[in-house]
Amino acid sequence: MKSVSFVFAIASAATLAPIADAGFMGFVAFSRTSGAYTMIDVFCAVSNASDKFLNVYNAEITTTVAGGFYQRDTADTRGWRPDGSGSTSTRASIDSFMTAGSLRVAGYPGVYAGSTTSADPNFTSSAWTGIGIAANGVPSLAGWYTNNPPSEQNAAESLTGLAGRRNSGPTAGEGSTGPTVGSQGAAWGIWCSHLVLSGTQQVVFGAAGNVQFHASASIKDGVTGVTTQGVSTIPAPGAIAMLAAAARLGRRRRTSSTTDRSSVMNTKNTLLCATLGTAALAAPASAGFMGFVASVREIGGFRVVDVFAAVSNASDRFLNVYDATISTTVAGGFYQGSSELNKAWRPDTTNWTSTRNSIDSFMTAGGTNYLLPAGAYSSETTAGDPNFTGSSWTPTAISAPANTVPALAGWYTNDPTADTNATEGLAGLPGRVNGSGASGAQFGIWCSHLVLQSTSPVTFGANGNLSYGAFASIKDGVTGITTQGFSVIPAPGAVAVLGLAGIAASRRRRA
């Protein structure tokens, strides 16, 4: 079992104890038999009915049962993608799949897999779609996510009364990162996996058993708005891990005569590693997300600030930015264009007016080339998470310009494998200022384009005119691991005032 890691980074030395019931609590599994098969449904246990699923990542899900996880042999069901065309992926299906929530349709019986489910790059195309051959194994470090977090399918359901329950246990914290509380007390869950085994199996979770389920998950807390991540293993440490289905136990009886994630998200800088065994392996220091890097220029009478998620490898992939605190004290806030497609934070990929030189503020999940410098146009795969409220992401004809970024807002790519989700070299970046952790970065993925109606120098930080701090998730292109981290611009202790080189040069000439 490989080490699974997620990273939080700090802007200050203070830390706060985690909120015990915030967001992701762990995984819950329920097993039962159906004819000659054993089915296991796994839920992300959450603390509130209003919580939203974002993704599962760095998953290690295996079985020693002969034949692996059962896949139904049709074109739409051989892989781990739920069947969205024939709608055959239900909680009663004799077929294994992943899901991002559940769908109930009036007049139709059963619970259907979420139609917004998408795979991250570690789910290779054949494993996700099952092209040509059944995908009976889950690729190492695979992940899946919802491509529409606000969807009504992305909803928690009550875990009361579901058969054969097995909880994940508390995961001890390391450093300044708090523990995962475990799912023992969870009353709510969001459906994320449907696993099927051939035969009426006695399911034994864990390294010595016949099923292993170990992964990390991201949940948007519906009360606080904070995104929480955690790593979780079924079963709880020390728990009895055998899940005999109720029907099988009944037959035996008849035949036997004896029988605080913190609400201040910019105060953490810790690497948490967890394994199924007792050993923990440190993640490489250079793996995946390193921090943010800003580039400051003047275009006409405006200051333009482009921000990149700095990464360690040219092959790394952007997944999302979340829990962002981005603000300015410049009069009028962040400048937005006047057209309906340009006055909110969603990039304009209809008329392609959101470019590196646009006098318009937007977020992006990478960039595309079209014979111009790399990343000149924003990515059409960019989507806003639920904290981009109201018309701040998708404007209307009568909505006001979105001159502020909502608290704890986030954005993501709805296609991590897109060719627009690519790094570019940061060498020669004009007006470069490094965020925490990013001083040595050579590669970055474009994620923000901020415009200020001012020619005054940009001063980053709490006492300046621009604040930029957020978490980001990056899929490491070398190791395949998904890493998260927090970064604030500038790095603590750095000089935060950015004047333009041209202005400085003209002052020297006049002196």
Image (cartoon, rainbow, N blue to C red):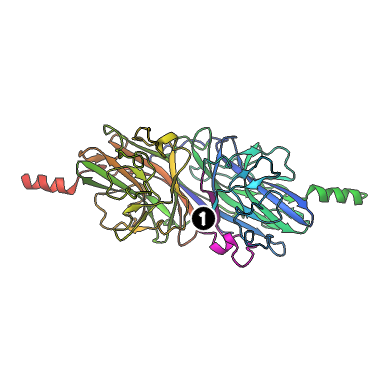
Q: Is residue 421 above or below residue 268?
A: below
Task: Determine whether the residue tagged by mark 1 lies in a helix, strand or loop.
Answer: loop
Residue at image position (57%, 64%) is 126
> Which is nearer the eye, 48 or 271?
48
Q: Residue furthest bottom?
A: 132
Q: Is residue 62 above or below residue 171?
A: below
User: Left or right of 401: which side holds 263?
Assistant: right
**343 lies left or right of 105:** left
- Residues 379 and 201: in front is 379
Q: Which x, y percent locates residue 204?
A: 72, 54
Q: Is residue 13 magenta?
A: no
Mark 1 neighbour density, 10 Å: few (under 14) some (14–19) many (20 or more) = many
Which residue: 38% across, 41% down?
345
Q: Is residue 177 visible?
A: yes
Q: Please indicate whether residue 98 sits to the left or right of residue 292 in the image.
A: right
* x and y percentages locating residue 170 in the rendered image: 61, 43
> Residue drawn 49% across and 50% down?
6
| Residue 74, percent from left and from top | 66, 62
Count all numbered tags in the image, as a single digit: 1
Q: Which range is magenta? A: 119-148
Residue 209 visible in the displayed image: no
Q: Which quarter of the image is occupied by the N terminus?
A: bottom right
Q: Position of residue 463 (x, y in %)?
A: 29, 34
Most common SS among magenta residues: loop
Q: Give the residue at mark 1.
A: 120
Tell which of 89 and 289 is nearer to you.
89
Of residue 56 and residue 60, the one placed in the foreground of this image is: 56
Identify the image quadrant of the C terminus.
Answer: top left
